[in-house]
Image (cartoon, rainbow, N blue to C red):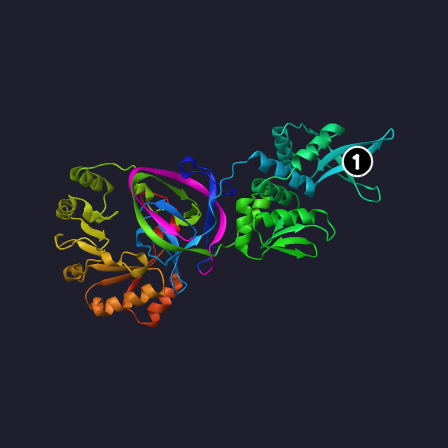
Amino acid sequence: MADFRWKPIETIREGEYVIGFERPSLNKHLKMKPAKVVQTICRPRSQTVRVATDKGSVVCTPDHRFYHCTPGIQYTWKRAMSLRPGNRIRFVADPFGHEETIDFQRGWLAGVAAGDGCFWNCRKDGRQYRRFRLAVKDIDLIEAFIQRAHRLGYELHKAPHTHTGFNGIHREQMPAAWLTTDKICQEFEAAINQPGDHEYSRGWLSGFFDAEGTFSGYVHFAQSEHSRHLETLSRHLDALNFRRVKTPKGMRLGASVQEGIRFFNECPPILKRKLKAIYGVSSRTWAEVQAVLPEGEAETYNLTTETHNYVADGFLVKNCDSEFTFTGGTRMTVDEIIAEVEKLDCHLVELTGGEPLLQADINELAVRLLDAGHTVLIETGGHRDIAKLDERVIRIMDLKCPASGECDKNLWSNLEHLRPQDEVKFVIADRADYEWTLRTIHEHRLEDRVKILISTVFESLSPRSVVEWMLEDRLRARFQLQLHKYIWPMDARRV
């Protein structure tokens, strides 16, 4: 989730926020940001595969896409079934269960108390008493501290605290939580500071970051050089194997952004303003694929988000561009489709999908539309035989490029059945795809035989770069954009 708490995908609801990535501009790296879930999809029975890597595994449908880095440092989205051992896919963070154990809550209370709270002694009638006060501007921190202390059986009360400087001049009034009973105060201090396991260390670091931490490319804890908390901070960081560096103003984690992401993942702060600091970073950690193994049929879930991607089991995966084609829709006969087309009063009809040639009645539908006076185009993926289509149909046929992972599915015999009015489309993801396209066009003399369309994988390759390559090679082809993706939302229907 966007707050670095993990939950099963089947429990996520529309309107919630998960971690996604967005590219500020075409030539920039993907940046982390909260991604609103706009649709959840459940497919009752689907074939699945397990993508196993050196950083864990994920079970998904064969067509689920992962952010993939090619040897030439080109980035594209690649289907699970097309991944091969040695391929690299984007890894963000280990899935981490964040059930708040008692040890975690004790640690968090102790971390906040060490960073912003105050245990002190006061004297009255010759006796010494122990007191506690947490006075901060963040009311959310006050409320969370009171609630977690309550779970441990301690009741703090709220009352404003007037903060004064060392010269006694009035500064400001802040909300505060108090314990003013000597016995309870001592018990509370002993309870939260009792050493615990790794959960306690996670909680302590989370609370200390809420109180004293900042993030500006790396996690930093502000403490004076002589602070008594530096030793405790070092001990908890070492317990969780974080790399730490002492600074003149405190301590920070190793400069790697990934170390910061790991910290937020394992020790998530509760303050929203602290969480916002991690957004905008670019995770550049990769997992190496070891195997893609069949898993059989299972119920599967997918999300549609505003960023068109999200993090699943630690890996960056992409929404299906048209996930709604798996669900909903209306079954119609050829007669019903013809009647619907006539209502639209349009001359040009394009049949697409999915793969339209998988439909048993596609030929009958095309012929009846043609006989009714319509111009009919069929857009096909290039892996189904087009020879049986009516001669009047204009064929727009894909030739899958290598980065798609489906190059081996191209039915090359289809090239023999193309006419000058037909079109061949190449969707390229990187320079290697472009070079392959160029060779294919020349080897099969496509410039002299058909119309050629060239497009880019959305958000993977700069359209300007491709146009410049085409001009440099004087390629006789038409460049096109998927305009609907620039005009309407990615999940828009009927466009």
Percent x, y for residue 206?
Answer: 60, 43
Q: Seen in the image, is 134 located left or right of residue 273?
A: right
Is residue 13 in view from this perspective?
no
Q: Residue at position x 43%, y 51% from top?
A: 55
Of residues 215 and 435, the one nearer the viewer is: 215
Residue 263 position in % (x across, y down): 56, 48
Q: Position of residue 63 (x, y in %)?
A: 31, 48
Q: Main secondary structure of the magenta part?
A: strand
Residue found 43% across the figure and 37% down from its top: 12
In the image, residue 14 sits, relative to residue 404, either above or below, namely above
Q: Position of residue 435 (x, y in %)?
A: 31, 67
Q: Which residue is mark 1?
A: 121
Q: Is residue 436 above or below residue 280?
A: below
- In the image, the segment drawn in magenta is 27-54
Judge by depth and name the residue closer to the eye, 377 or 327.
327
User: Residue at horizontal 66%, vertical 28%?
Assistant: 154
Residue 452 makes an appearance in the image: yes
Q: Locate residue 493 relative to residue 117 in the image: left or right.
A: left
| Nearest to the observer: residue 35 or residue 313 | 313
